Each structure stands twice: as C-alpha cells, then as structure tokens.
C-alpha cells in the first residue's frame, strides 16, 4: 500500500511539473526554417543592436542645457574686464580709461592700466609711458599774480597772430612759440597770465641783449628811433612768443590739426618741432625751450639760456627756489617729446573691475588741463583683445582643456578680437554694444563669457 501511494504521488507530481513547463517541445513542422523567417530574424537583430548602441551613447554623452536666471544676492558684484586696444591717432597723454554703470563710475583709471606710445608708423616705442593722473600738471604759474589786463598795461608781449601773420612769423623767425586757444576755453583763461608773463620776460631779455650789444659796439642810443630799436629787439629775441585764436581763425588751426586747447607748439625754422605738455609755469616753459634749442642748434648759437636769468628774477620767490632751479638747469636731462603733428598713437593694456550692472567702458580723449575740439579727434582703433572674466580659465577653454564645450561659446568669449575700426570723417566714433552673461559649467570653475 505504501508503495502504491508513493507511485501515485510521484505520477501526480510529474504530471503537474510537465503541465507547468513554459518551454514545451514544439511540433517538427513549426521548427522548420524559411527564407521569410530568416529575413525577419536578421532585421530584428539589427534593430536591437542599433537601439542598444544609441541608448548606450546617449547614456554616456554630455547633455548641454541652458537656463536663464536672475543673479542672487550672494553672487559676485564685480567682474574683471580685460583689454588690449591700440588708439591709432590719440597720444597717451590724452587717452583715458573711464567706466560708468548704474551703480557708480570710475574716471581716469590708472590702476592695472599700462600705456605704450606708438609712433606715426604704428611702431611700439621702447619705453612705457608713465600713467599720469592728469591733475598732477600745474595749469598756471602761482608766481604770476598779475591779471592779463595788468600785464597788458604796457603793451602785449605775447603777440597776437592771424591767418596772414602766422605764415609770415613761421618763415621769418627761427624759433616761434605759439599758444593756440579759444575764447570759450576756461583752461586757456587760467593759463593766459602765465603765457603773457613769458612773453614779457622774453621781451625784457631781448632788450637787455640789444643794450649789451650796443654798449659793446659803442653805439649811441640817440641815433636810433623807437621803431628801429623795437625791430632790433625782435631780431635779437631768442624766441618769439605768440598766440592765435582758433575761434577766430579755424582754418589755420584745422591745417595745424589742433585738437585740444590750449596747445603750445614750438616751430623751428618754419616746421613744428613739438608740443609742450608739462607744468604750465614760466620756469618749466623756459627749461623746455633751452633744451629744445640745444637739440636744433650748435653750442655757439644758443641764446635761450639768456631768458633763464630774467625768468628767475621774475618768478622765483625764495632763495630755496632759486637754488633748486639752478640745480635743475645744470643737471636735468633733456625732456623727451613727441612731434604730435605726425599722429602718434597709444596702446592701452590692462584690466579693470566693473560692476555687474548695465554700464559703459570708455577710451576717450580728455585732459584735466585742455579743452578738446571733438570733431577733430580721431578715435580709430584696433582691438587686439577684449573679454570678461578670468584669463586663465578662458585659455583652458580655448586650448581644449575642458571637453564638450560648444564652439559657439568659445567664439563668444572675445568677439571683437582682431577687428580694426577706422573713422573716415569728422564727428565719428565707434560704439560697441555687448551683452555679458555668466556661464556656469558643472564640476568646473565659473567662467564669465560673452553671448
């Protein structure tokens, strides 16, 4: 009985297992292959392989997505602006960097900004220009306490020129010192007494030179008229000090390319030798004239040093100042100058920190001590580099240090680089408008780029 029950149980279990099998043996006619079946099987295998490859590639590929959001209060409030720009017809003395924004402004920025002089042929000079604060220059001589009216009481010593007498003076006088000015220029008004005092000192010097010459030759003063004596004074003068009103004679100033007022220009033998841009004091002007004459004349022909004695008596107010100026006269090196009539330029290189707010970055012609003729100012320029953000991070991006960054973003970092902008007429200046956005890459640094 036990054996019968065991057999019955085994038979029942075997039948249950067989009925539960999902992979039962198929009929022979079903397992036979056909051409259609082989084609469908091959197509299915190819489809599954393609899907597998595509899904795997999509899984391991980087997904670039862009979102736009407002900056939170914890983000950086300032961003670095990098620039390397050459102003082709603007001297470094007048080129300034200013930044304006809705938050505030910075004028005449000198920190982290370098200026390099460019000659008229576009060649970089060998030395770097000092980045002066323009209010370092003295705009008038405090030792000249008289007004222009007081100095004109005994006549005008700084001779006024016009469109006809200016060419004549250039041709007749070996050294002609001209102040170009306008009547509506405050800086010109402040400088006027100093300039007239210089003319008066030169006239006194010439008179003493004539008197010494006549005494040496034993000549009698009474045999010569006042007109002849005055003519002798003008001939003996080391330099003729003059002035020309650009408001009254604009064609003359346009021909001389006077773009800022006052401009003090020295003409030697009828040609422009240089513009004086130092301290506007009588002694500094005389020092400059002495060294300029030394550059154009032989030692036996020098006469400017005669002015120095009379200038010292006229303007030096203490013994300490006299000793200082004597030492300055003996030991100072000749002042370097540029022939500004030949269009020197300026290359500005550096960076500034600007607010993360709408604003303007300006390179313009301005001076604390001069008023400019805006329509004659040429602001043609070359953009060597202009970008925002960390320079090292940008270089890593450009050199392929970070993979997967779209090429469009790399190009947007400095879209102005290598461009040349030339103004072809008066009253023209280029304005570049850009939108600056912050671009963040996951698992990397924060880069600020242009879009």
Image: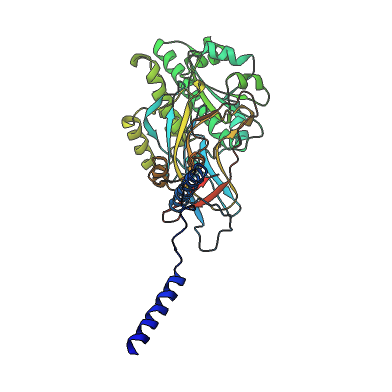
In what quadrant of the picture does the N terminus appear?
Answer: bottom left
- The single residue placed furthest to the left in the displayed view is 331
Image quarter for residue 373?
top right
Viewer-proximal residue among 363 and 270: 363
- The single residue placed furthest to the bottom in the displayed view is 1
How many numbered discs sit on the rendered protein? 0
Image quarter for residue 192?
top right
In what quadrant of the picture does the C terminus appear?
Answer: top right
In percent of the image, x 41 and y 22: which residue is there? 292
375 left or right of 284?
right
Viewer-proximal residue among 279 and 8: 8
Q: Is residue 81 visible?
A: no
Where's residue 408, x and y in %? 51, 40
Viewer-proximal residue among 134 and 198: 134
In percent of the image, x 37 and y 45: which residue is there? 401
- The single residue placed furthest to the right in the displayed view is 248
In percent of the image, x 60 and y 18: which residue is there? 255
Viewer-proximal residue among 163 and 69: 69
Q: Is residue 222 above or below residue 349?
A: above
């Amino acid at each position: 009985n036990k054996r019968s029950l065991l057999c019955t149980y085994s038979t029942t279990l075997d039948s249950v297992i067989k009925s539960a099998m999902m992979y039962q043996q198929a009929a022979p006619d079903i397992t036979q292959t056909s051409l259609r079946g082989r084609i469908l099987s091959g197509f299915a295998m190819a489809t599954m392989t393609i899907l597998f490859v595509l899904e795997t590639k999509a899984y391991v590929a980087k997904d670039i997505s862009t979102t736009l959001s407002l900056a939170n209060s914890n983000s950086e409030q300032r961003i670095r602006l990098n620039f390397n720009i050459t102003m082709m017809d603007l001297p470094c003395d007048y080129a300034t960097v200013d930044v304006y924004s809705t938050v505030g402004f910075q004028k005449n920025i000198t920190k982290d900004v370098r200026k390099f002089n460019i000659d008229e042929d576009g060649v970089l000079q060998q030395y770097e220009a000092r980045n002066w604060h323009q209010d370092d220059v003295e705009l008038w001589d405090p030792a000249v306490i008289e007004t222009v009216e007081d100095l004109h009481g005994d006549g005008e010593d700084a001779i006024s020129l016009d469109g006809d007498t200016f060419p004549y003076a250039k041709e007749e006088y070996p050294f002609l010192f001209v102040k170009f000015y306008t009547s509506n220029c405050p800086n010109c008004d402040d400088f006027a007494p100093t300039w007239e005092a210089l003319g008066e000192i030169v006239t006194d010097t010439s008179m003493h030179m004539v008197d010494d010459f006549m005494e040496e030759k034993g000549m009698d003063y009474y045999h010569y008229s006042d007109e002849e004596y005055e003519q002798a004074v003008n001939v003996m003068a080391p330099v003729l000090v003059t002035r020309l009103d650009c408001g009254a004679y604009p064609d003359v100033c346009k021909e001389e390319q006077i773009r800022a007022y006052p401009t003090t220009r020295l003409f030697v033998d009828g040609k422009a030798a240089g513009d004086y841009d130092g301290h506007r004091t009588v002694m500094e002007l005389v020092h400059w004239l002495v060294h300029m004459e030394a550059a154009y004349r032989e030692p036996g022909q020098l006469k400017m040093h005669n002015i120095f004695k009379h200038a010292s008596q006229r303007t030096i107010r203490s013994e300490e100042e006299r000793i200082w100026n004597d030492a300055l006269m003996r030991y100072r090196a000749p002042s370097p100058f540029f022939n500004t009539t030949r269009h020197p330029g300026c290359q500005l290189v550096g960076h500034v920190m600007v607010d993360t707010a709408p604003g303007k970055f300006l390179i313009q012609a301005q001076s604390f001590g001069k008023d400019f003729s805006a329509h004659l100012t040429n602001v043609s320029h070359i953009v060597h580099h202009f970008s925002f953000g960390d320079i090292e991070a940008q270089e890593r991006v450009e050199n392929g240090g970070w993979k997967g960054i779209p090429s469009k973003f790399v190009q947007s970092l400095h879209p102005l680089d290598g461009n040349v902008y030339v103004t072809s007429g008066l009253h023209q200046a280029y304005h570049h408008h850009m939108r600056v956005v912050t671009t963040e890459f996951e698992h990397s640094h924060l880069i600020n780029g242009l879009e």
